[in-house]
């Protein structure tokens, strides 16, 4: 919604394109600048006033009926995400918004230098990871339980959804992500076997980036292909929050980073062979 507002034909003098939140909200009942800001941040939706959503889309010059119907449907479905709403207090800042987008993605591109990417994790690995962080982050057993449920639910909704085709998943893992142990040998063996299983499916591609000279991104990131909606890029912050952006410049920057690492990483079959070696010890 923010990108649609910022890139629409100008209605105010002196603007090359787009409109301010103040101009967008003018004359709309029960929609303030602050409320629109929260909607654009994914914190709330239009609740029952779908009319305001349709009026905004008209002001933004959106004429694609498929896109309008899709946005209206997303707004209608948002309150149904009870599993997410009930657990959002235990999630980092920005995470509920990201998880909602992730479940709608038709494609997910991700890189992690030091951990197995979340959507590839087994329950055992995820639990061991959360427990390892618990003393330092001062979290509780309940926090671990809730976040483990969230992680497994996210995995199911993206890779095994009941109502649509699974998302296409492309992942690059740094060698450290596969060699750093969490849990005992059995947990790690199960995790390697799970990555092998997923990498052999039609919709998942996993590559390992070995220790070597050359370019590698310093931080993890995920790019969500949302079909008719703007592509989103997500990064974790040093404060434990989640930052997302749909700005084309940012999306392009992280896409270039991923593409630069694809050529240096092992191919899928080579990665599977490497994982078999780890399984065998």
Image (cartoon, grey):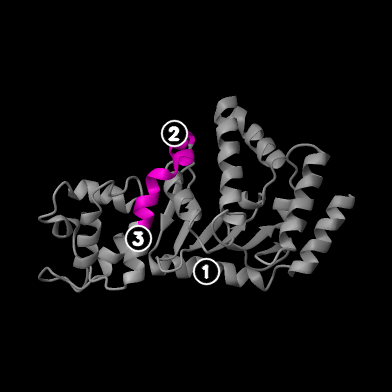
Q: Nearer the viewer, residue 237 or 92?
A: 92
Q: Residues within 10 Å of mark 2 (few under 14, many from 20)?
A: few
Q: Which residue is mark 3?
A: 71
Q: Nearer the viewer, mark 1 or mark 2?
A: 2
Residue at the (79%, 46%) spot, across then down? 190
Q: Is residue 188 above or below residue 12?
A: above
Q: Which of marks 1 and 3 precedes in the sequence?
A: 3
Which range of residues does the magenta coloring cover? 73-90
Q: Which residue is mark 2?
A: 89
Quadrant in the picture for residue 159? bottom right
Residue 97 in percent (x, y) is at 42, 48
The single residue placed furthest to the right in the displayed view is 280
How far apart, in angstroms, are the residues tagged by discs 1 and 2? 31 Å
Principal SS element in the magenta part? helix
Residue at the (30%, 50%) spot, across then down? 39
Q: Which residue is mark 1?
A: 255
How far apart, in angstroms, are the residues tagged by discs 3 and 1? 25 Å
Q: Which of marks 2 and 1 precedes in the sequence?
A: 2
């Amino acid at each position: 919604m923010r990108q649609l507002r910022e890139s629409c034909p100008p209605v105010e003098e002196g603007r090359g394109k787009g409109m301010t939140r103040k101009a967008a909200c003018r004359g709309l009942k029960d929609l303030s600048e602050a409320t629109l800001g929260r909607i654009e941040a994914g914190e709330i939706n239009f609740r029952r006033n779908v009319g305001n959503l349709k009026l905004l889309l008209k002001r933004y010059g959106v004429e694609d009926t498929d896109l309008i119907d899709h946005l209206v449907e997303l707004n209608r479905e948002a309150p149904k995400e009870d599993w997410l709403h009930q657990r959002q207090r235990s999630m980092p800042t920005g995470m509920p918004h990201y998880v909602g987008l992730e479940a709608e993605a038709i494609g997910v591109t991700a890189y992690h230098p030091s951990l197995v990417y979340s959507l590839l994790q087994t329950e055992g690995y995820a639990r061991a990871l959360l427990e390892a962080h618990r003393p330092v982050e001062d979290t509780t057993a309940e926090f671990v339980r809730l976040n483990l449920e969230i992680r497994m639910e996210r995995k199911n909704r993206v890779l095994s959804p009941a109502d649509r085709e699974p998302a296409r998943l492309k992942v690059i893992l740094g060698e450290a992500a596969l060699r750093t142990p969490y849990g005992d040998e059995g947990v790690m063996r199960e995790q390697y076997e799970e990555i092998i299983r997923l990498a052999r499916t039609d919709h998942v591609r996993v590559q390992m980036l070995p220790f070597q000279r050359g370019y590698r991104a310093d931080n993890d990131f995920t790019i969500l292909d949302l079909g008719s909606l703007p592509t989103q890029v997500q990064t974790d912050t040093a404060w434990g929050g989640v930052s997302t952006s749909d700005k084309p410049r940012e999306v392009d920057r992280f896409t270039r980073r991923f593409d630069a690492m694809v050529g240096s990483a092992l191919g899928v079959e080579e990665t599977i062979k490497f994982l078999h070696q780890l399984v065998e010890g």
